[in-house]
Image: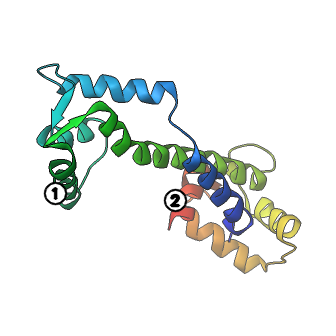
Amino acid sequence: MFMSLYCSECLSTIFLLQQRELSGDEIEELCEAFQEFDKDKDGYISCKDLGNLMRTMGYMPTEMELIELSQQINMNLGGHVAFDDFVELMTPKLLAETAGMIGLQEMRDVFKEFDTNGDGKITLTELRQTMQRLMSETMSPQEINDMVKDADVNGDGTVDFEEFVWMMSR
């Protein structure tokens, strides 16, 4: 319910990010990681090393993804991956990661709309007032209580940012 106001804006932001190119820092990160696995320094890594390299960078490819990548590499690249091919494989993953971070910033912005006094917690009163202001929606006190109660993991009667993120991801 909170995010319905911002969903189209977030999707537009993510779409634009997916159209961008990698930054110099992102390419440098890929280069450093690639060089660690290019043991003989010939500018190539093996299919087997590709999976390990992806894992060291925090990506957890499934066995099926690795099999598909391996088949693609063996057919198109002779069983080895050059740095340019590695960048091409990793670009969508890095862009998706960046989009996720932007999504978190968007989530912070939405949270701030509800946390009107800026204390890091959304109270019953703030929720009711913000729902009326942003959505022209009048909710009963019971509906407001239920929303907060559902999201209030620590039981303090308010919704902090972590609880807000958890609630939005359900």
Report the Cα–Cα distance between label 2 and label 1. 34 Å
Residue beneath the point at 63% across and 60% down? 11
Image vertical order of residue 83 relative to residue 7, above or below? above
Of residues 78 and 54, the one nearer the viewer is: 78
Q: Secondary structure under badge 1?
A: helix
Mark 2 and mark 1 residues within 8 Å of each other at the beta carbon: no
What's the residue type where badge 2 is placed? Trp
Image vertical order of residue 35 relative to residue 106, above or below? above
The answer to whether any part of residue 153 appears in the image is: yes
Q: Secondary structure under badge 2?
A: helix
Q: Quickly name the residue at label 1.
A: 67
Of residues 132 and 62, the one nearer the viewer is: 62
Relative image position of residue 40 (x, y in whole percent): 11, 20
Quadrant containing the N terminus is bottom right
Residue beneath the point at 28% across and 27% down? 33
Relative image position of residue 6 (x, y in whole percent): 71, 61
First in residue order: circle 2 vs circle 1: 1
Of residues 11 and 169, the one nearer the viewer is: 11
Q: Of all residues shown, which one is farthest toward the top? A: 41
Q: Of the numbered discs in the image, which one, if any, rests on residue 146?
A: none
Number of numbered discs:
2
Of residues 32 and 105, the one nearer the viewer is: 32
Image vertical order of residue 19 relative to residue 2, above or below? above
| Disc 1: CA contacts within 10 A as few (<14), some (14-19) or many (>=20) | some
Q: Nearer the viewer, mark 2 or mark 1?
A: 1
Relative image position of residue 77 (x, y in whole percent): 20, 43
What's the residue type where badge 1 is placed? Ile
Q: Quickly name the residue at label 2.
A: 166
The answer to whether any part of residue 158 appears in the image is: no
Q: Is residue 153 left or right of residue 8?
A: left
Which colour assignment does the render follow?
Answer: rainbow
Relative image position of residue 58 (x, y in whole percent): 31, 40
